[in-house]
Image (cartoon, helix red, strand yellow):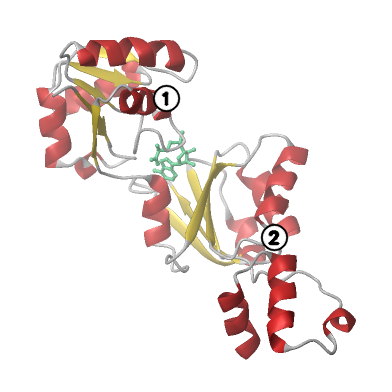
């Protein structure tokens, strides 16, 4: 059966590749990757020789159609990205989508993803989380995006580059407030580091070098509601009104009220 394999690769430490990932790459006819010069290092390390073809953000739509057609004709294609899990803030979504639409089987070979690595080691609640990828580059867009995340009660996960980490953390502090954070830097690599605590206490300690994941405690879901408006209402009506105003489900609000 025609199959696309979506293979996760390490985010730093090459020992994090799985046995199944290696087997799949060895069994593939073609590897679709982002930067062939980057991926060749991984392949050389594991002694795998396979044709590599670049599959970038800029050629994704065109290339996806072409790859899907070749998979249908029987070519075994494995999709990887420069690091981590393809399609997670990386190219891949379009190819997977087209394969699904054409009835091609898609199998993911799981492995590292920086967001999950950071979350699992963050010490912040992980029962509910929202991965928001990279914040917009421009200050106005970034603040707007953060504003839209302000009332989210789930733990937030963001990716950031060394060029913007300081600016972004300052904007997070300003828009989301002094929340507890865990900032993961260079995860699984030699200089891996985590900074944990209220954002105001760690912001000046961040060395803007390497790759970052920012894990942020969720909001309390508080929005101002004039107490006068609530006066005289039944508990049920208070919950209904607050749920409308804040977007928080009634059962959650009930728990908050009880506390
Ligand atoms: N697909 C990848 C994944 O599954 O994690 C993410 C690719 S995205 C283009 C690259 C971003 O992921 C980096 O800018 C950084 O925010 C984060 N990242 C990747 N590797 C990392 C690492 N070793 N330590 C910290 N952050 C990392």
Where does residue 20 sit, x and y in percent of width and height? 13, 39
> Which of the four quarters of the rendered structure image does ligand 1 lie in?
top left
Dot 2 crowding, Cα within 10 Å, few <14, some 14–19, many 20+:
many
Mark 1, ligand 1, within 8 Å: the answer is no
* Residue at disc 1, secondary structure: helix
Name which residue lies at 71% across and 64% down. Answer: 177
Q: In this view, does 60 lie to the left or right of 243?
A: left
Name which residue lies at 67% across and 62% down. Answer: 151
Name which residue lies at 14% across and 33% down. Answer: 22
Q: In this view, does 199 lie to the left or right of 128?
A: right
221 is higher (above) or lower (below) than 89: below
Label 1, label 2: how far apart the Cα atoms are: 33 Å
Where does residue 17 sit, x and y in percent of width and height? 20, 40
Which quadrant holds residue 122?
bottom left
Dot 1 crowding, Cα within 10 Å, few <14, some 14–19, many 20+:
some
Q: In front of the other: label 1 or label 2?
A: 1
Name which residue lies at 18% across and 10% down. Answer: 73
212 is higher (above) or lower (below) than 222: above
Q: Mark 1 points at which residue?
A: 94
Q: Mark 2 points at which residue?
A: 176
* Residue at disc 2, secondary structure: helix
Q: In this view, does 74 lie to the left or right of 231?
A: left
In depth, the one of 35 and 129 nearer the eye is 129
20 is higher (above) or lower (below) than 205: above
- Of the image marks 1 and 2, the number of the one nearer the N terminus: 1
In depth, the one of 203 and 226 nearer the eye is 226
In the picture, which quadrant includes the N terminus? top left
């Amino acid at each position: 059966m025609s199959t696309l394999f979506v293979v996760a690769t390490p985010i730093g430490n090459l020992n994090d590749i799985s046995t199944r990932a290696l087997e799949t790459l060895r069994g593939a006819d073609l590897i679709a990757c982002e930067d062939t010069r980057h991926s060749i290092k991984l392949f050389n390390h594991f002694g795998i020789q396979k044709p590599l073809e670049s599959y970038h953000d800029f050629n994704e739509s065109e290339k996806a159609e072409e790859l899907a057609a070749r998979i249908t004709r029987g070519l075994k294609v494995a999709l990887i990205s420069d690091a981590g899990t393809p399609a997670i803030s990386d190219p891949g979504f379009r190819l997977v989508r087209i394969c699904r639409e054409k009835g091609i089987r898609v199998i993911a070979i799981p492995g590292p993803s920086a967001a999950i690595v950071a979350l699992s080691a963050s010490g912040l609640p992980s029962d509910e989380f929202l991965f928001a990828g990279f914040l917009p580059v421009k200050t106005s867009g970034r603040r707007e995006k953060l504003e839209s995340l302000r009332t989210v009660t789930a733990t937030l996960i963001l990716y950031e580059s060394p060029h913007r980490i300081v600016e972004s953390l300052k904007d997070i502090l300003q828009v989301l407030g002094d929340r507890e954070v865990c900032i993961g830097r260079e995860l699984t690599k030699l200089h891996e580091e985590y900074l944990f605590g209220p954002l105001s206490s760690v912001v000046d300690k961040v060395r803007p070098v390497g790759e970052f994941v920012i894990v942020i405690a969720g909001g309390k879901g508080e929005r101002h509601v004039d107490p006068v408006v609530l006066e005289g209402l039944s508990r049920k009506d208070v919950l209904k009104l607050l749920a409308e105003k804040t977007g928080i489900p009634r059962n959650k609000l009930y728990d908050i009220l009880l506390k």
